[in-house]
Amino acid sequence: MAVRSVRELGTISSNVRPMVERALERTGGLLRLAPCWVPRSFLHPGQRLKLDPKDLYAFGLDRGGIDERWFASTTEAANENRTPDEGLSYVVEDGERCTLRDAVGELGADLIGERLWSEYGRWPVYSKFFDNMGPIPHHMHQSFEDAARTGQEGKPEGYYFPPQHNNVGNAFPYTFFGLSPGTTRAELRRCLENWNRGDNGILDLSQAFRLKNGSGWLVPPGILHAPGSLCTYEPQWGSDVFGMYQNLVEGRSVPWSLLVKDVPPDHQQDLDFILDQLDWEANVDPDFKANHYLEPIPVADTLAEGFDDCWIVYGRSNGKQYFTAKELTVQPGTRCTITDPGAYGLTVVQGQGRMNTLTLDCPKLIGFTDLTEDEVFCTERAACAGVVFENTSAWEPLVVLRYFGPEVHPDAPEVGDHRASA
């Protein structure tokens, strides 16, 4: 249930540290976060974010509809004509608010742990719900090396399709991944050459996979993908770089500017440079599904104790674990203590309960400026000490998703391990 407006709840704090420390003391190391909505001018909202339909275009029709909600984000959305705080999550406490980015900047290791703070100096990941009515363009996210050419960072990402947000599949619940084995560079180059001559035909060079509720994918940088229309939970690196390689989607044109948004200005007409951003071998991998598809894997056998914690996003991109995610299900009347070795962002997708002293409540409908009780940031110290979850409902499970930063769970499963646990 939404409670009071975030605008009513607080002015921007002029003294971040005392405000955040009060919140941590009261909750045992947790921070309440307000919903963070992000529009995309080139997409069509799928209307499964629980955002009030009258607020779908709250940023203005010219900015496009809201089809993303970002979780525990310190990353700015790379949108044209963006608001100054677009993409940034807010901490709300006792009549005040501040961005999570400012909270982390002020308290550093006290929030995210000494290792992440010393290595990155920020909370380097975020997650989102991505919710589109149909497919989006076949695109890629730059590698760290290529993104650095424009002063940015690369973006690996993971997908999970939560059943609670997918009561309908919308227009196209299939995703094109990569390129069909045997595709040549010359064939793909022709697609770019034909950008202004109608459909450039790039999907003729790819293959689609049907999306399955309760499953997911791991997508490293440099891999083309055209996400389908299931609402998707996406843990990812704290970056918003991309390049759209498809020029026409459902009759809507994609401007060249979205292909070269994160390409250095002197290379924005250089087709070979643009193609070089792709990880070619990964795109034409004949075993693409086996090397990227994910199924939930139980953390431990705890069903008899009334709860179940499962890995939902795991694995490594180019040898590094950039993020992981888990889904915790707590049965009615059950109370459990969950420990993790690092900080995390959490969102509730079903039910009611408590997390330490904080109320958890999955909303039915959210106004654009509402503060909900479904999003929390957990500090590393609290996660290591153990967080108490309790389902206060008499009839339905409490289900929460939480995501973690790089190398927090070095013993997490690898892609393909779900076959052994099936």
Image (cartoon, rainbow, N blue to C red):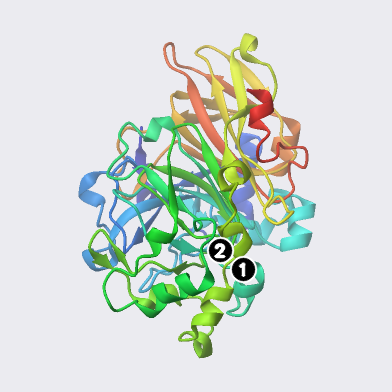
* Residue type at the position of mark 1: Glu
Circle 2 is placed at which residue position? Answer: 239
The disc placed on residue 153 is 1
Q: Residues within 10 Å of mark 1 (few under 14, many from 20)?
A: many
Secondary element type, mark 1: loop
Q: Quadrant of residue 409?
A: top right
Q: Is residue 61 left or right of residue 39?
A: left
Name the foreground residue: 7 vs 78: 78
Q: Quadrant of residue 258?
A: bottom left
Q: Position of residue 230 (x, y in %)?
A: 38, 42
**Image point 36% across, 49% down: which residue?**
8
Name the foreground residue: 195 vs 327: 195
Q: Examine the rendered structure and indicate whether residue 385 appears above or below residue 302.
A: below
Q: Are marks 2 and 1 in contact (CB under 8 Å)?
A: yes
* Residue type at the position of mark 2: Ser
The N terminus, quarter of image: top left
Q: Position of residue 337 (x, y in %)?
A: 67, 23
Q: Is residue 385 left or right of residue 325?
A: right
Q: Position of residue 155 (x, y in %)?
A: 58, 61
Q: Examine the rendered structure and indicate whether residue 190 appears above or below residue 115.
A: below
Does residue 405 show up?
yes
**Image point 75% across, 35% down: which residue?**
384
Q: Position of residue 400 (x, y in %)?
A: 52, 31
